[in-house]
Amino acid sequence: MKPLPQFQDDWILSHRPPRNRLSADRPYAWLVEPEYAADGRVLDVATLFLTNRECPFRCLMCDLWKNTLVESVAPGQVPEQIRWALDQLPAAQHLKLYNAGSFFDARAIPPEDYIEIARLAAPFERVIVECHPRLVGRRCWEFRNLLAGDFEVAMGLETVHPDILPRLNKGMTLDDFARAVRSLRDAAVAVRAFILVRPPYLTDAEGLEWACRSLDYAFSVGVECCSLIPTREGNGAMEELARQGLFAPPSLESLEQAVEYGLSLRTGRVFLDMWDIDNVSPDAPNRAERVARLAMINRTQRFEQGGSP
């Protein structure tokens, strides 16, 4: 087998298209959607996509940097984003504060804003943020201690494939991930993992196999909830890999089978990220019904055997 190429910061940056123009006092997106909670209730979750400085890690597959800033936000601007967005949205029970990087990156979310952010989050039963495993530490515990309700941290596991994970330029090992999960669980913080379905360099069948192995691993180290992410184009680097024959998105069938496998484990919740589902297998048979079924599985955490063709 020919050795897999390794792409690092300079190559990834050189293939980027322009980033989107954003305002530092407004989130770049906000919505409320239902989610099946750990206690079996289906709750409304307010998700705010905060505008802040770009993540310091240049992951090969990431396109989230398009909605980030070159410079850090000033203290007070992130709370203003949260305050403004919550005023636009209906009531919800849980709050996701996603920031296209790591909530505990001090250059992204100023730590001096934690007190006001926690105050704004006080009406919610649970607050969920995202963070790179290597940035889980002191600031995480400081923020947790300010919260009135439960706390959950979402982290990108991506894949447990031993050759692919190092080539995603994520700056993380499986030991880093497991160590972060342990620290969070010891502090009574819930953990969610993001898992890629068919990262670069894999066939569709291999992508499904390693998504399933990654689910096994995530639950084995203490993750309580997994979100399966269909790997997509959109950051320039992935388009170039596709041109070289090193990447193609997963099929709708692979996504169905990955979700069903994860739920069959009966170990924790498993969601399929539907954000870009319209671009997955556009010519698949019975596509509308199958996508609707996946959305229903997300809401109920149940599936009928033989549901995928």
Image: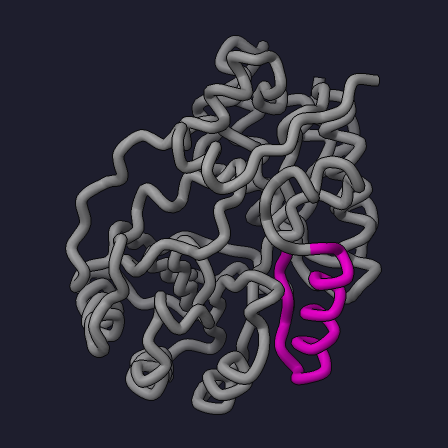
Farthest residue to the front: give it.
10
Query: Does the magenta segment cover residue 189?
Result: yes
In front of the other: 65 or 213? 65
In front of the other: 224 or 299? 224
Asked whether residue 67 appears in the rendered view, the answer is yes
Position of residue 28 relative to residue 63, above or below, is below
Rendered location of residue 81, percent (x, y): 22, 66
Check the picture and name the quadrant holding the C terminus: top right
Q: Quadrant of residue 186?
A: bottom right
Tell me which residue sits at (49%, 14%) in the image.
282
Does 153 sit left or right of 185 as displayed? left
Does 18 sit left or right of 223 as displayed? left
Tell me which residue sits at (72%, 55%) in the image.
173
Q: Which residues are magenta?
A: 173-193
In front of the other: 41 or 31? 31
Dominant secondary structure (helix, strand or loop) of the stretch shown in magenta:
helix
Rendered location of residue 258, percent (x, y): 72, 35
Rendered location of residue 252, percent (x, y): 61, 22
In front of the other: 34 or 198? 198
Position of residue 100 relative to residue 238, above or below, is below
